[in-house]
Amino acid sequence: MGLLGSRNSTTISNAWSQTIFLTCTLIVGLLLGAPLFHFIIKSSGIPLPLPLLVGVGIVGIVFAAVVVSQDAWLLGGFISLIVLATFNADIPILPAANKYPTAIVGRILLVHFPLIFLCLIAVAAGWYYDSPGVPVYLLGGFVVATVLSVIFGIRVKFIPAGFFVLYAVEIVAVVWLVEMAIRKDILTMKQLVTIFLLIIIGQAFVGVAQLLHQGSFGLSYLGEGGAYKRVWMTLPVVGSFSIGPFVAGFTGMSFTLSIFCATAIPIVASLAIREDGIRRNLLLLSLVLFVAIIRFSAADSVRGAVILSSLCYGALLFYLRSKDTLTISLPKGTKTKGICLVLLLLLIVLVPSHVTGDSFSTTMSSNSSPVEVVSHSTAHDVASGESLDLTSQNVSESDKTASTREKTTSKSGESALTKEKKLVTSANNTTKKVSIPFFSTANLGTRFQQYGVALDVFADHPIFGIGGVNFVHIAEDYGLSVPDGYSHPRLIHNTYLAILAETGLIGFSLYMGSLICIGFYGWRLLNMNSTDPLLVSGILAGLVGIAAFGFWNPQIYNMKITFIFWILGGAIFGEYQKEKNM
């Protein structure tokens, strides 16, 4: 395959070995090579500045050389896109990037490099002459809606809103590139999900290492999180140990890694059903690994996403069996073992591990703090729900702000802050009466009040919204306060309400329309004989998990989760277009 061309039938037959080799080369280099280089330089006392970044650069150069030597420019680019989409490493491009509540503002992530590279190649190859599917047009309309929200929004902060427009353009580019890659046979859908699974397995092993180490390794420039609060767990024989947000690989936060694992579970199950022997056993072991990461991440919302994803997957399998579309040939006793394994894994997931309330009370010791403190491990992660890290300086500044606010309140009477606290207290008292088995409801009151404010904002600005990432800048006007340790109110912990409030009805309708297309195209694929309905079922169920996670979290502001979601969604779009045109 040349720089601009698609693969022919001969190259496709040899693509699996090349895909696995290139993927493993990049993953091993980033997860082992760069950190090893960092620790060798540090321990040897060589005065090399930023050795971890140098190590990442060396890995990039080596990988590029391998790609060029194999004449796999496009394949290597897409492998880089999928792999690097899971990393939290970023480079600030604005002096005050820290003051914004999300990494999509004022930062360049590693994934941007292959994204730009692939866009340049696609334009040079004339891919735009091939009409994309409806979802690309809908997302393109969403970009227009974000621009309109900047123009017609009230008191818009132009820097965050402008970066949100750019972010929407990037989402369109990701979907378009992946769709065209599938249609042009640069990647098959199975190869794409295999790349995804390999990097998530690698990230999960890093998470296991962090769990055993009981903290991070100080590799923040590669995307490792900072010093987090943790939950304590006690098991027989093992004794007491901590779990929580530090079990994150290089995704920045355990919530991100665990939702990736949740997405991977039904996909792995689909592949395991089709495989046999050692491959099936390895896939089943990866299921255990993923469930362990989810359990030790202490993320209630992800555990809920796993349950919904599993129910969706089971329903899709039942549908396929009822239509005689799915034939499963397993050795005697394998089905029983598989059912027992699934029930055991679900039971492990259901064991409560509340990330909220008083259970998060013990901070990590100082020796677990990052060695290299970088921008993405401080302010913006705290606000976006991707981090619980607070430096002493941030706390000090927040204390000063809180002190000033208290003085102002004493002079002017009851402030919005006091009103908000009363509202939150009332809401929390109400939700204490709500009981959801195996899950914590400690923060429901705060979330519901935030959702009410988002609907109020939408009611005031229903057509164009208030501009991307602007909710935090007007939330105080609606009664939401700045929590202790924060520089602004929290982001809306609901992806769909966030889009509704910030881009208005126009942007919300277009974005939701593209989501509906995933389900529609996926359903059509399930009824096509020329594709693998089992793999499609796994991908759809995994995407349902991410969509469910977004109902309780500001997932839209998390570039890593959003890119992976649309990479898998783009695979569905591309597969449908390819099968329809055959």
Image (spheres, rainbow, N blue to C red):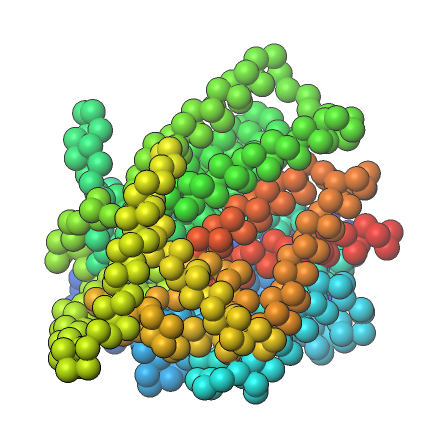
Q: Position of residue 187 (x, y in %)?
A: 68, 55
Residue 391 on image: x %, y %: 18, 68
Residue depicted at 28% across the width and 48% down the height: 429
Q: Residue furthest top?
A: 332
Look at the image and tell me whether residue 182 can be seen: no
Q: Residue at x 43, y 24 (%)?
A: 344
Image: 379 above or below 448: below
Q: Is residue 86 above or below residue 172?
A: above
- Residue appearing at x 59%, y 59% in the figure: 566
Q: Quadrant of residue 333?
A: top right
Residue extending farthest to the right is: 582
Residue 413 occupies quadrant: bottom left
* Residue 22, horizontal then vertical, whole percent: 55, 55
The residue sitting at the front extreme is: 413
Compare residues 473 and 373 and report the one nearer the observer: 473
* Quarter where residue 115 is shown: bottom right
Q: Is residue 140 left or right of residue 63?
A: right
Asked if residue 490 shows in the view, the reply is yes
Give the percent coordinates (x, y) of residue 55.
35, 66
Which residue occupies the foreground of this view, 450 or 536? 450
Q: Is residue 319 left or right of residue 158?
A: right
Name the image quarter holding the N terminus.
bottom right
Left or right relative to 501: residue 1: right
Q: Is residue 485 left or right of residue 80?
A: left
Residue at (73, 44) in percent of width and height: 523
Number of numbered labels in the structure image: 0
Q: Is residue 161 above or below residue 279?
A: below
